[in-house]
Amino acid sequence: MKVLMIAGAMHIGGLENQLMHLLRNIDRKEFTIDFTSNKEDAFFRNEIEDLGGGFIVFSSNSRKHPIKYCIEMYRIMKTGKYDVVHSHELFHSGINLFVAKLAGVPCRFVHAHSWCEGAETGGNYSISRKMYHCLMRFLINHCSTTQIACSTWAGNFLFGEKAIKKESYHLIYNSVDTTSFLDKYECIERGEFCEKDGWKNVIYVARICPLKNHIFLIDIAKEFKKRNKKIRFLLVGDGDEDVKENIIQSIKENKLEEYVQLLGVRKDVDVLLRKSSAFVTPSKYEGMPLVMIEAQAAGLPCVSANTYSQEVDFGIGLVQWLGLSEGAKVWADCIEKAVNKPRAQKEHVENAIRRKGFDSKIFAEKMCGLYLDDYNRRRK
């Protein structure tokens, strides 16, 4: 079975990691997954090709012109003779699915990963944007054969309340490779960034951009410095250079070099989680953040903004939910308590992962099952 995955650039991010978990866990004798991208040197390109997947880069012309994009996408789908097209591009999925229907692709999947769009979290979109949402939602619901959401909030936002009652709608939580956390659960790490001299680590893994709200952590770090508390933030990730420069400038101006450390993109997030005492997420909104699942899989107490579905919570007392409006002092209080909490018992973590389906192997089984079910229905 041939699957075409449409998910932006396939560079670095939570969605991209989720799809790589799927590619790593499929039966490659039964499934082939190709990916489209608008970035020639995308981070995951080499691994995708090493795992037998195709990597299709759009021409520079089609990236800027909607009609040329549709023509090129149609050609890709026709030439590839795909059984499944799976789109992950929020409302833009309406275009992808419409083209897929024209191209005769029998199984057309759409995946909701967010309950918001852009910087707007209150639903106060412009009239033109609301019209765009209505048109794309119509195309999505009428051109897709299967609808999937990573959370109830995300499903409501993209498909609407009526659509999520259909038999073709499925709620499937995001997942991570939990073996890297559970197999080394009791491992004591050594080396750089280990907690010593009384310092406690609080880790945040996210792309640097306004949405992820790193600058709020600077205010909390200032509060720790004022209280003379040895609690430092390890910020993992890269992204918007202007935002990053603003963070660096704020660190220098407030002399927070000991309290905030930017680590850039790392491949050892599981190790850094074991070197930390707590995890924090101050995002303005999320779909269902994979790093939140990873942090709980590592047994870490978490302090999170209540700006996304709490379905991500393992339900074993690890997460403290807070409003961003509660301010730096309240957040500092909660983080201070979190770093002094013990990690969760491994047995409780394993049970939660199994119960909620947060493991990547479970996710891959569910997705491949849906591909086959939809394909078999279309053949009848």
Image (cartoon, rainbow, N blue to C red):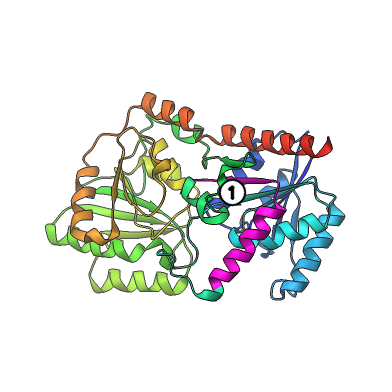
Visible in this render: residue 66?
yes
Query: Which residue appears farthest toward the front when viewing the image?
Result: 162
Residue under the point 19% across and 55% down: 330
The residue at which mark 1 appears reads as 163
Count of labels shown? 1
- Quarter in which the C terminus is drawn: top right
Q: Amino acid at mark 1?
A: Ala
Q: Does residue 210 belong to the magenta stretch?
A: no
Please say if 34 is above or below 212.
above
Please say if 257 is above or below 192.
below
Judge left or right: residue 347 versus residue 85.
left
On the image, which quarter does residue 351 sit in?
Answer: top left
On the image, which quarter does residue 158 sit in?
Answer: bottom right
Q: Does residue 146 belong to the magenta stretch?
A: yes
Please say if 375 is above or below 85.
above
Visible in this render: residue 9?
no
- Quarter in which the N terminus is drawn: top right
Judge left or right: residue 198 versus residue 57.
left
For the record, the magenta segment spans 129-151
Q: Nearer the viewer, residue 354 or 95?
A: 95
Residue under the point 22% across and 61% down: 327
Label 1: which secondary element: helix
Query: Which residue appears farthest toward the left when viewing the image?
Result: 227
Q: Nearer the viewer, residue 199 or 375?
A: 375
The picture places residue 205, in percent across and down from the top left corner, at 42, 53
